[in-house]
Amino acid sequence: MHNSSSGPPAKPRVGSSQPSEASFKRKRGVFQKDLQHMMYGFGDDPNPLPETVALLEDIVVEYITDLVHKAQDVGSKRGKLLTEDFLYLIRKDPPKLHRCTELLSMNEELKQARKAFDVSEETLANAD
Amino acid sequence: MKDPFEAAVEEQESPPESPIPPEEEAGGPSAAADGDEEEVEARSQPAASAPLSAAAGGGRAKEEDEEEEEENMEELSKIPSGGDPDKLAKMQAILSQFTEEQMSRYESFRRSGFQKANMKRLLTSITGTQKISVPMTIVVSGIGKMFVGELVETARIIMTERKESGPIRPCHIREAYRRMKLEGKIPRRSVPRLFR
């Protein structure tokens, strides 16, 4: 079967939902493995149906795309896209907002912890 | 009698009682959630990595976590943390009563996540030129995961309504998506998408 793209990884999907402004080629099943584990964790069968996974991937990518576009609208006055723009968008959704702030603070804590770890390693190394 | 799994899922609304990994105690004595996510999720599931698992220090953290591969969910919950002791106790009580199937499902729930690299690539392709920061990947992955959760749970509810069983089928997801749209949970473009 002759495929239009000669390069190996990116195959344009037939009839894919490409936004009118940006054209991007998407591989099928980029998030397939992750989604399978996630679906099982949230209540699906240990082996979800492939068509369900594919549909979910489409929906999630579209959701994220719309979310990002909205965030860009919000952040366009500033010129840059910031994390805060996303937080603004989900402010009406308490579980998501709570989870995101939790993730961000965890990330900060880990960064600090690693920095402290690196510093103490250095000190030990220099002391030798 | 409440289903322990459902109770546990509700518990997730608040910070998990995750422990601080021993090697990092030097830095972070403080509250709740931290190393748990990282350890649990950086392990033997190559495809599933948490939004957090590769944050700012990436490779080295993963090595340390792999040394602790034998830690499973039960042991993790025994490690004390600075979190709310009440919630912690409740969580432990629930986790100890899990059946194997429930435990495995819970593990998948905690560990699964979008791969950072893929998410980064997707975000870059959407924004076009923007440099995508690590916190942004983390936030979007978190939002995405919760969104998947809402869809799957709503689909399960629909299946119970229709008295169907087995794996979730696309029609359930579509119905779930439709319902969520009605509730306004899906960001809608003010300009309709033309060329699909």
Image: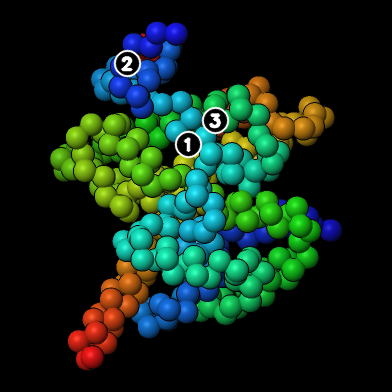
What is the chain identity of the residue bearing mark 3? Answer: A
Q: Which residue is mark 3?
A: A56
What is the chain identity of the residue bearing mark 2? Answer: A
Check disc 2: other Cα within 10 Å, few if <14, some if 14-19, many if 20+: few
Q: Which residue is mark 2?
A: A5
Check disc 3: other Cα within 10 Å, few if <14, some if 14-19, many if 20+: many
Residue B157, image quadrant: top right
Q: Nearer the viewer, residue B139 or B107?
A: B107
Point out the tag, 3 or 2, that comes first from the N-terminus.
2
Q: Nearer the viewer, mark 2 or mark 1?
A: 2
Residue lying at 42% horizontally and 63% vertically, measured from the top left: B62
Q: Amino acid at mark 3?
A: Leu
Question: Is the Cβ of the residue at disc 3 closer than 8 Å to that at disc 1?
Answer: no
* Label 3 and label 1 in one chain: yes
Could you tell me residue B171's position as x and y percent?
66, 22
Q: Which residue is mark 1?
A: A31
What is the chain identity of the residue bearing mark 1? Answer: A
Could you tell me residue B9's position as x and y percent?
65, 55
Q: Dot 1: what SS?
A: loop
Q: Amino acid at mark 2?
A: Ser
Residue B76, image quadrant: bottom right
Question: Is the Cβ of the residue at disc 3 closer than 8 Å to that at disc 2?
Answer: no
Measured Cα–Cα span from mark 3 to mark 1 = 10 Å
Question: Is the Cβ of the residue at disc 2 closer than 8 Å to that at disc 1?
Answer: no
Q: Amino acid at mark 1?
A: Phe
Point out the tag, 2 or 1, that comes first from the N-terminus.
2
Residue B182 seen: no
Q: Is residue B119 above or below residue B56?
A: above
Q: Dot 3: what SS?
A: helix
Q: How many marks?
A: 3
Q: Is residue B49 above or below residue A73?
A: below
Residue A27 vs residue A42: left or right? left
